[in-house]
Amino acid sequence: MQSGTIPTVIIIGAGPGGLTLYHALIKNKDKKEFNVKIFEREAHPTDRWQGYHIGVNARGVRSLMNCLPSSVASKLPKAIPNPIPDVECHGISISDHKGKCLIHPPYKQVKDVFELTKVSDDFSAIISYRDRLRDVLLEDVPVQWNKKCVGFEETEDGVWAIFEDGSREFGDILVGADGVNSLVRKQKVPELKIFDYNVNIINADVAVPKSFMDRSIKVHGNTLIQKSLGTKGDWTFNLFRLIPIENNNDTEPHYRTTISFAYPKKLDIKLSDKIKVDDNDPESVIKYVKHLIQTLRPECELTDILIKLWDFVPKSSDPSDQENYPFKTYNPTQRRKLQDINPLSVKTWTSSRVTLLGDAAHAMNPVFGLGTNNAIKDADVLSQALLKYSPENYISCIKEYENEMRKRTSSDVLMARSFTKRLSRPIGFFGVIIRNSIMKVINTFINIYGAK
Ligand SMILES: Cc1cc2nc3c(=O)[nH]c(=O)nc-3n(C[C@H](O)[C@H](O)[C@H](O)COP(=O)(O)OP(=O)(O)OC[C@H]3O[C@@H](n4cnc5c(N)ncnc54)[C@H](O)[C@@H]3O)c2cc1C
């Protein structure tokens, strides 16, 4: 045990990154003790909707196991249910606009989340339920709710977190884990700007009946993350589990599925005379997506399936409508900008008592499913660096963490950006032939040299 006063770490934001950091600092208490305080702007745990699926990969799970106490880690299968052998294939497949499979890597299939920690590649994953993952991570964490941080003030001896309600909290280290629109980041590194792809993305959660899922699997296969690439810069992705939704009153089983549709923003201008869309009215957004798919995609079974999936999205915007919302989505169905943040895009980054973690530092587009995994890895690396904390050397601990975090995540941000920018460009007849041929070559390579 250490001597002297116990330093205080203030965490802003109770998302997956902030909560994992809380657990890690408490777990390491016998090596280095901190008072840890965590503040969240939401009023209570179910204030905002948290429904999307998230692919948790081997890298993320290894860090989760390092950070969580065994009492919490043992509950992870509630949020990351065991794969169903021979029924579910956890991984990503990419097809073209007609449903022809282009990429299908040989992801290692594991029996549960604990076995995933032993997989040597970083990409093998299990699809988890985001809302349940948050519930598991909230266990034993005394989150202070309804505390929106609006800024901080550094002094020689520490740092004040300033809250919207007028209160202040003093600590030795302040960690901004407050997501893509982080106010902590805006004050700490104002030059670090959000990159806008000029692409819109619309996400929704739906309950898909078994008969329809069977039809979709005939075209797409049973890989649980499925992308399809259009030719006009549009692309789709669906994430699902083949575990029937509990308490579903229907006789036919239904499966929880996250669906996304992305397209170049300039199409909005072209279509603005023909079709009106209001982002506060989910019904108009759903109609718009269906119109876009119909206009941009060829007539084929895959196109029919993609359109029909949007019919399952609840049209009402009232989340208390439980019948139509068997589970709630993170955000209402509306157009959102596709964005990311490259933490190496600024020349100067001064390490201080205030640092950033997760999307606050390096939001990335969801195409490779790496955002949460990196936020969890950040918590692991930062908690390890803080084991060496002393009042004299805190800067070097933070610097060690930030150097690793910025390098690791910048390469993921840029990889996802370059892939997505290419997908988001319209291509013609020869472009399709070239794209499909390149992808097939890549597929052959990753199947020969990929995960064993
Ligand atoms: C459709 C979709 C699919 C995705 N799929 C995947 C996937 O398969 N795999 C993957 O790894 N990632 C995925 N992601 C990305 C993932 O959701 C994020 O990377 C992840 O949530 C980041 O965690 P975080 O803790 O850094 O931030 P967040 O989850 O954004 O949490 C930040 C928290 O801080 C709180 N907060 C914000 N501002 C303040 C403030 N001023 N004061 C106090 N509290 C504040 C917020 O309310 C929130 O609770 C996906 C994202 C989307 C949209």
Image (cartoon, helix red, strand yellow):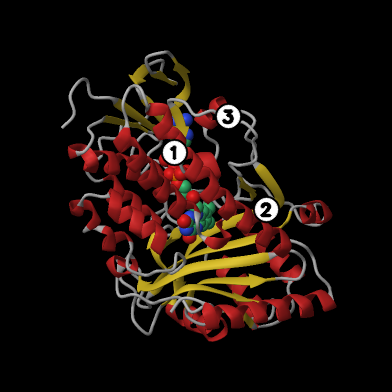
Identify the element where label 1 is drawn.
helix
Numbered disc 2: secondary structure? strand
Q: Is residue 330 visible?
A: no
**Residue 38 placement (x, y as % from top left):** 33, 32
At label 2, the amino acid type is Asn
Question: Quadrant of the image for the C terminus?
Answer: bottom left
- The amino acid beneath tag 1 is Glu
What residue is drawn where x is 63% and y is 72%? 228
Q: Position of residue 337 (x, y in %)?
A: 65, 48
**Quarter containing the N terminus:** top left
What separation in Å lies between label 1 and label 2 (alpha carbons)?
36 Å
Mark 2 → mark 3, Cα distance in angstroms: 26 Å
Residue 103 on image: x %, y % = 60, 78
Residue located 67% across and 53% down the image: 200
Residue position marked by numbered label 3 in the rendering? 189
Location of residue 109 (image quadrant): bottom left
Residue 200's label in the rendered image is 2
Pick whichever, 41 or 157, lies toward us.
157
- Which residue type does callout 3 highlight? Val
The quarter of the picture where residue 294 lies is bottom right
Q: Is residue 62 left or right of residue 176?
A: left
* 203 lies left or right of 54: right
Q: Is 145 above or below relative to 380?
A: above
Q: Residues under labels 3 and 1: Cα distance?
A: 18 Å
The residue singled out by tag 1 in the image is 400
Viewed as shown, does residue 347 lie left or right of 378?
A: right
